[in-house]
């Protein structure tokens, strides 16, 4: 059976969605409905009360309040248990909104380290930022998208600080496919995504077919998909954060033909570069 891949909810504001988790463990059917799946976006949980068990890439991750949890895009996961008093916040974020240095940090987290306790010094500032983000998301505001985006940008660096200061020392044996995929993802961040799959395979000292096999096993997606995904994320950032026209953006990304770039963008995302820009600036 094919593992489903879920897209971000339509209620997201500028690529960000946040909701309370107060009903998570009160009805077991809530857990069953989600099932085993992947998401094409980042998920952050801030657990303020109770206990949760999440299976992530075949490993049971036990989460006790007060903690933060990250689920990376395309990780296979499913909720296994939530205590009746489980509460907190669920935050989903489009990948293009996560800065590259943060994305690289999250990518290198072992599954056991994707959960981190919130210490007393971090708690007040973190929860105030989360509450402000949630309130801004829920209310009608002028410049709402920009405000929500700015608050998430502050929050993601608070997450980084918490993970960096964690004393979690649990070790995990990564399988070969996961290690090769991690090396490949690091190379994408350090090298142009316009290189061919064979370029990256040569860098890792394996064949192109083996690279494709390992990446597919680890993520359910091909090397070509991840190269195109990296390009799309950069394009989305230019469209979101700058006023550059599509032709300029295409050239900055290394495309000689801006019309080809626009066609490729629409083929992958289902919308034109301009419609993406307009949608996220509504």
Image (tube, rainbow, N blue to C red):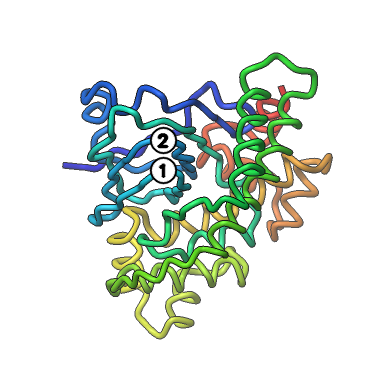
Residues 3 and 78: in front is 78
Q: Could you say whether the residue bearing mark 2 is in a helix, strand or loop?
A: strand
Q: Residues within 10 Å of mark 1 (few under 14, many from 20)?
A: some
> Whole-percent x and y of residue 74?
39, 49
Q: Nearer the viewer, residue 110 or 238?
A: 110
Q: Residue at x 38, y 73 (%)?
A: 180
The numbered disc on residue 65 is 1
Residue at the (69%, 46%) spot, across then down:
237
Callout 1 secondary element? loop
In the rendered image, which residue does mark 2 sit on? 49
Q: Are marks 1 and 2 in contact (CB under 8 Å)?
A: yes
Quarter of the figure with the N terminus: top left
3 relative to 135, above or below: below
Image position of 9 with respect to 186: above or below: above
Q: CA distance from mark 1 to mark 2?
A: 5 Å
Q: Give me the residue at 25% from left, 42% from top.
A: 3
Tell me what residue is drawn at x 43 percent, y 34 percent. Answer: 7
Residues 193 and 186: in front is 186
Residue 275 in picture, x, y percent from top left: 66, 28
């Amino acid at each position: 059976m094919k593992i489903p891949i879920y897209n971000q909810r339509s209620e997201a504001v500028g690529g960000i969605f946040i909701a309370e988790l107060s009903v998570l463990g009160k009805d077991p059917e809530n857990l069953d409905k989600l099932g085993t799946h992947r998401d094409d976006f980042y998920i952050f949980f801030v657990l303020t009360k109770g206990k949760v068990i999440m299976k992530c890439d075949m490993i049971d991750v036990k989460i006790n309040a007060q903690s933060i949890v990250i689920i990376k895009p395309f990780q296979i996961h499913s909720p296994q248990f939530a205590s009746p008093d489980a509460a907190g916040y669920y935050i989903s974020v489009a990948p293009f909104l996560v800065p590259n240095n943060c994305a690289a940090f999250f990518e290198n987290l072992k599954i056991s380290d994707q959960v981190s306790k919130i210490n007393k010094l971090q708690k007040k500032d973190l929860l105030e930022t989360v509450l402000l983000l949630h309130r801004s998301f829920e209310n009608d505001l002028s410049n709402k998208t920009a405000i929500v985006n700015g608050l998430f940008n502050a929050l993601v660096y608070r997450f980084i600080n918490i993970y960096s200061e964690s004393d979690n020392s649990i070790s995990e044996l990564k399988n070969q496919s996961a290690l090769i995929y991690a090396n490949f993802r690091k190379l994408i961040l350090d090298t142009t995504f316009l290189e061919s799959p064979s370029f990256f395979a040569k860098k890792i000292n394996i064949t192109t077919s083996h690279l494709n096999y390992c990446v597919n096993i680890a993520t359910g997606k091909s090397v070509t998909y991840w190269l195109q995904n990296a390009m799309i994320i950069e394009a989305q950032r230019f469209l979101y954060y700058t006023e550059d026209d599509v032709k300029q953006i295409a050239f900055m990304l290394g495309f000689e033909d801006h019309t080809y770039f626009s066609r490729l963008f629409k083929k992958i995302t289902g919308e034109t570069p301009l419609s993406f820009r307009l949608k996220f600036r509504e």
